[in-house]
């Protein structure tokens, strides 16, 4: 096979297994996987990429993704090192894109700053939260985001964008597939850490009761249609427990699809298609997936 400029980049591995890097723990390899520790390293890597561009995927905790069994035919980039730093624990907390959301929630509360407690239950990163406008319990990322620093791999430019300029909507941003979130600043208010801790405890308790914790899943499968809940519709059609291969609709929450160890990404996809088809046929509602399918699938 001919060599590619990415083959000679430090920190880049060929044919790297992605399954352990996602919450579904399934899927094929990345043609290239890069672990990047600083903005300078990211710029250098993007310069090599620009010589011969291939598809790009920025991977956070892989908590909203299904990677196909044939893998990702391009470069997967994972941020670490400096991207895991939290700075300025003042009114605006700036966090690197690789900071896990539960850590950000706990650290800000500990520092006497409130407002990010909702993040404690979302097992993703700051980058993934900006890209998806993640949210729960009545608060979304856009409600607390001041701005995000975004790097464009195509132009080599870094821009600072407000929620408006990111086009943040329900589980949506206008970020392109060649744009990396480097960091984000969040609005917080001073408050009693005990109050923040109580809120986080309540959120965690609610999740333990209502969601299939400790299982292989990627959170909500479908976005909620306007004025309704995808889980409620799926439940009402009696689809809890519906199974294709090693993947089933959770008995605890119908908008979570739980995989058995060894289940395949194509089985997740097939179950998503089947539930979508039945819901459309029986209710007329066309559900839109919230989880993202990436790479190549067998079926
Ligand atoms: C048990 C469970 C519960 C969940 N509950 C919620 C919930 O309550 N609310 C909610 O909104 N979501 C929820 N999710 C889904 C998921 O955690 C969020 O969407 C989260 O924001 C994804 O972050 P991530 O870092 O894992 O992103 P990934 O899954 O790795 O990636 C998701 C998308 O973000 C992009 N991305 C990741 N990092 C960057 C970056 N630095 N720059 C640019 N793009 C990037 C990826 O390319 C991809 O398009 C849940 C998931 C699980 C497993």
Image (cartoon, rainbow, N blue to C red):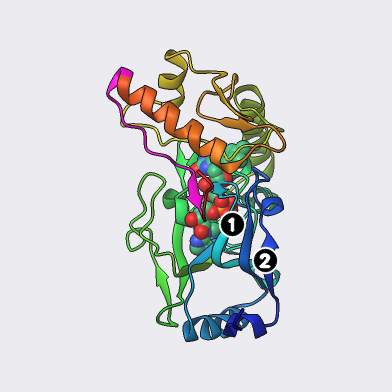
- Is 125 located above or below residue 220 in the figure? below
* Disc 2 residue crowd, few under 14, some 14–19, many 20+, Cα 10 Å: some
Circle 1: element type: loop
Residue 143 is situated, as x and y percent measured from the top left of the image, at 42, 49
- Please state, as top left, top right, bottom left or bottom right, where the N terminus lies in the image: bottom right
Residue 130: say if magenta.
no
Q: Which residue is mark 1?
A: 71
Tag 2, which secondary structure? strand
Residue pictured at 55% horizontal, 48% vertical:
65
Q: Give residue 179's position: percent from left, percent from top.
A: 45, 69
Residue drawn 42% across the image and 72% down it: 160
Say which mark, if any, is on residue 23. Answer: none
Horizontally, is 152 left or right of 200 in the view?
left
Task: Name which residue lies at 47% across and 83% down.
Answer: 50
Quadrant position of residue 154: bottom left
Asked whether the beta carbons under mark 1 and mark 2 sit within 8 Å of each other, the answer is: yes
Q: Looking at the picture, how far across and down is residue 272, in whole percent? A: 47, 33
What range is drawn magenta here? Answer: 282-294
């Amino acid at each position: 096979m001919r060599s590619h400029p990415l083959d000679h980049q430090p920190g880049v591995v060929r044919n790297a297994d992605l399954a352990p890097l996602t919450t579904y723990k399934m899927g094929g390899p990345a043609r290239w996987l890069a672990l990047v520790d600083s903005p300078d390293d990211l710029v250098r890597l993007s310069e090599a990429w620009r010589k011969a561009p291939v598809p790009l995927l920025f991977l956070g905790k892989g908590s909203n993704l299904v990677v196909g069994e044939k893998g990702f035919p391009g470069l997967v980039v994972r941020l670490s090192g400096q991207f895991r730093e939290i700075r300025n624990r003042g009114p605006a907390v700036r966090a690197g894109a690789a900071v896990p959301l539960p850590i950000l929630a706990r650290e800000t509360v500990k520092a006497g700053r409130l407002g990010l407690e909702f993040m404690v239950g979302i097992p993703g990163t700051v980058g993934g939260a900006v890209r998806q406008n993640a949210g729960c319990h009545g608060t979304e990322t856009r409600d607390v985001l001041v701005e995000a620093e975004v790097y464009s791999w195509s132009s080599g430019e870094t821009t600072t964008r407000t929620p408006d300029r990111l086009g943040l909507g329900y589980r949506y941003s206008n970020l392109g597939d060649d744009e990396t979130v480097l960091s984000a600043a969040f609005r917080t208010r001073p408050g009693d850490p005990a109050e923040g801790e109580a809120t986080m405890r309540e959120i965690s308790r609610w999740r333990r009761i209502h969601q299939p914790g400790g299982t292989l899943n990627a959170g909500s499968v479908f976005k909620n249609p306007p004025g309704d809940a995808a889980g409620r519709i799926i439940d009402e059609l009696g689809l809890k427990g519906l199974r294709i291969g090693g993947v089933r609709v959770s008995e605890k929450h119908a908008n979570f699809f739980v995989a058995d160890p060894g289940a395949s990404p194509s089985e997740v996809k097939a179950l998503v298609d089947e539930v979508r088809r039945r819901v459309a046929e029986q209710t007329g509602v066309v559900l839109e997936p919230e989880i993202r399918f990436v790479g190549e699938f067998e079926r």
